[in-house]
Image (cartoon, helix red, strand yellow):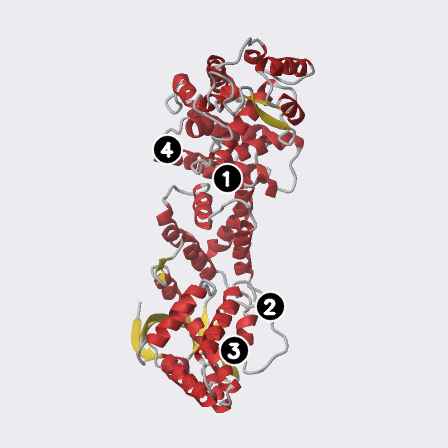
């Protein structure tokens, strides 16, 4: 790799060449805080203040591509545009015209005027600022240009504040600012081609921040996938489809995490830090389009896993699948996501039917309910690798029988006693689950447990809009012998219709029992430990908690009870 470096000031740099921001670069992303810092540095600095380095590569027709430094160069261009307008507004038209030569000038190649700073993607708002003319209309910023508009306005505010006094004083200040900007110094580092530039880009920091995996993957793909023109950059639009999918989601979906899970659902296991390098090494030019298409598909599926409501329709028979996906969000687990993504993709693409995918995802739900939500067992890299390995296997399998075999093997591993706590361990932690006006941290988990226990015994699934949680012993601790802690225990909680809850209110247990017995006769599920009780004290609450734990462990969340077609 041939590298050439030079020391220049901004005036010489902008006079010497035209510059273009490649498609693989981030959009302009300096916020008001960074604009303010740059302005303060400019005003406090010496005339030859050093602002860092720029990495450039030779593009086409005398244009240099910017690898590192586009945030600073864009900010300086915005400064020059605002300074030009201020010169003209303060009766210095020649000075304004002089500055315009650093913003837009003829090329010696065609004698046509070109902007000194150009972008590969369409940038109507930046062009609007760069043009040396007054316009009655202001274009809408394109995608990625919102901070350019805000940055320009911020600079305008700073400039207005700096121009105080009479006309002569304002003109003097403008001239000083111009000399200060043009005297800023930097080191330029030039390489021969975009490929070398991409390598450098992937090892640099942007204003002190490590490049994210998404930046590295994007830069690699867009360097391989050429756009027809700036107005029709389909590869960039496809990439933005991924970002838009997550921006519109109500779930928290970090792009870097998605990229890792998408990779693990199809390819060899690796850590997050190694993903960018692996993509660059593995995904060749002739594979880039396929890889991008896979990411676009997976981004939709990944969002649906985290936000089931994002899927347009759910058939009646699919509702248990939706409930399992929602449960995984309650548990906030990340380890199984490559496996769940692979399963969801198989189902979405019509490669596996519901009868295979449902027990596979339910097994994940049950495993993490027991291991994560209740007992909070320590996670291990072994579980993550197990999920990723089976995700790759099911993706690679070519027949339904082969895919079903992978699911059976995975479910067997999840059901293994080596991976699950004992009933005693589970029961001890289950009995610690609490929910009340005082204990609110486990509210979602408690509701999930009560819904699941109810549905396992009742012919009618619990309607979340109609059913509410009744505390048999009041939360207010007015019942002798039942404290706030006891009243919050799961053994004291029961799902009942809202109107029944309102009627029971603060009645005694004897009165509540009569109402529950009458409702049970009409079809409401109420377990025998309540219906057969003669009193309701701490002892009954603890006993019912233990019974609920046993039923949960051995029946409702039993992985072994899941049936996969073809199982013996």
Whole-angstrom CA distance, mark 4 to mark 3, is 55 Å
Which residue is under mark 4? 379
Residue 111 makes an appearance in the image: no
Whole-angstrom CA distance, mark 1 to mark 4, is 20 Å
Q: Position of residue 478 (x, y in %)?
A: 51, 21
Looking at the rendered image, the disc whose residue lies closer to the viewer, 1 or 4, is: 4
Whole-angstrom CA distance, mark 2 to mark 1, is 37 Å
Q: Position of residue 419 (x, y in %)?
A: 38, 25
Answer few, some or many: residues within 10 Å of disc 4's Cα (few below 14, many 20 plus, some between 14 and 19).
few
Looking at the rendered image, the disc whose residue lies closer to the viewer, 3 or 1, is: 3
Residue at 38% x, 36% y is: 385
Q: Position of residue 102 (x, y in %)?
A: 45, 82
Q: Which disc is residue 140 wearing?
A: 2
Q: Earlier in the sequence, mark 2 or mark 4?
A: 2
Which residue is under mark 1? 341
Q: Is 349 or 518 nearer to us in this picture?
A: 518
Secondary structure, mark 3, is helix
Q: Is 199 or 181 nearer to us in this picture?
A: 181
Residue 308 makes an appearance in the image: yes
């Amino acid at each position: 790799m041939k590298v050439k470096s030079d020391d220049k000031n901004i005036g010489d740099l902008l006079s010497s060449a035209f510059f273009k921001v490649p498609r693989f670069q981030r959009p302009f992303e300096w916020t008001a805080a960074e604009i303010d810092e740059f302005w303060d540095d400019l005003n406090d600095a010496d005339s030859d203040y050093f602002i860092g380095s720029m990495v450039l590569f030779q593009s086409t027709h005398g244009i240099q591509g910017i690898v590192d430094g586009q945030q600073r160069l864009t900010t300086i261009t915005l400064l020059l545009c605002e300074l030009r307008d201020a010169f003209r507004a303060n009766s210095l038209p020649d000075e304004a015209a002089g500055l315009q030569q650093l913003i837009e000038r003829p090329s010696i190649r065609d004698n046509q005027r070109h902007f000194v700073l150009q972008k590969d993607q369409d940038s109507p708002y930046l062009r609007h600022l760069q043009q040396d003319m007054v316009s009655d209309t202001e274009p809408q910023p394109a995608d990625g240009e919102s901070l350019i508009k805000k940055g320009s306005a911020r600079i305008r505010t700073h400039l207005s504040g700096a121009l105080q006094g009479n006309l002569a004083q304002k003109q003097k200040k403008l001239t000083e600012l111009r000399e200060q900007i043009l005297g800023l110094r930097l080191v330029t580092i030039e390489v021969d081609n975009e490929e070398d530039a991409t390598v450098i880009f992937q090892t640099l920091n942007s204003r002190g921040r490590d490049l994210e995996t998404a930046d590295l993957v994007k830069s690699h793909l867009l360097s391989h996938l050429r756009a027809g023109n700036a107005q029709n950059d389909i590869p960039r639009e496809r990439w933005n489809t991924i970002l838009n999918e997550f921006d519109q989601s109500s779930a928290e979906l970090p792009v870097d995490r998605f990229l890792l899970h998408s990779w693990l659902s199809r390819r060899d296991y690796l850590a997050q830090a190694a993903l960018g390098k692996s993509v660059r090494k593995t995904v060749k030019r002739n594979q880039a389009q396929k890889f991008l298409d896979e990411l676009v598909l997976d981004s939709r599926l990944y969002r649906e896993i985290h936000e089931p409501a994002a899927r347009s329709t759910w058939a009646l028979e699919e509702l248990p699948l939706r409930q399992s996906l929602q449960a995984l969000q309650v548990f906030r687990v990340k380890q199984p996501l490559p496996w769940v993504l692979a399963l969801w993709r198989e189902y979405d693409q019509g490669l596996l039917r519901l009868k295979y995918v449902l027990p596979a995802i339910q097994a994940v739900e049950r495993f993490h309910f027991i291991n994560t939500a209740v007992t909070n067992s320590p996670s291990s890299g072994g579980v993550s690798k197990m999920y990723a390995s089976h995700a790759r296997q099911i993706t690679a399998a070519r027949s339904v029988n082969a895919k079903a075999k992978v699911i059976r093997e995975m479910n067997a591993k999840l059901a293994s006693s080596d991976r699950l706590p004992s009933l005693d361990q589970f029961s001890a932690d289950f009995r610690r689950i609490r929910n009340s006006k005082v204990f609110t941290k486990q509210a979602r988990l408690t509701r999930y447990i009560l819904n699941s226990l109810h549905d396992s015994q009742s012919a009618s699934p619990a309607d979340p809009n109609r059913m509410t949680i009744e505390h048999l012993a009041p939360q207010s601790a007015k019942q002798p012998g039942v404290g706030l802690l006891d009243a919050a225990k799961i053994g004291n909680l029961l799902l009942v219709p809202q109107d029944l809850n309102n009627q029971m209110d603060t009645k005694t247990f004897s009165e509540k029992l009569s109402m529950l017995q009458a409702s049970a006769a009409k079809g409401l599920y109420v377990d025998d430990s309540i219906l057969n009780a003669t009193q309701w004290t701490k002892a009954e609450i603890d006993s019912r908690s233990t019974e609920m734990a046993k039923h949960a462990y051995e029946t409702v969340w039993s992985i072994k009870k899941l049936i996969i077609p073809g199982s013996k």
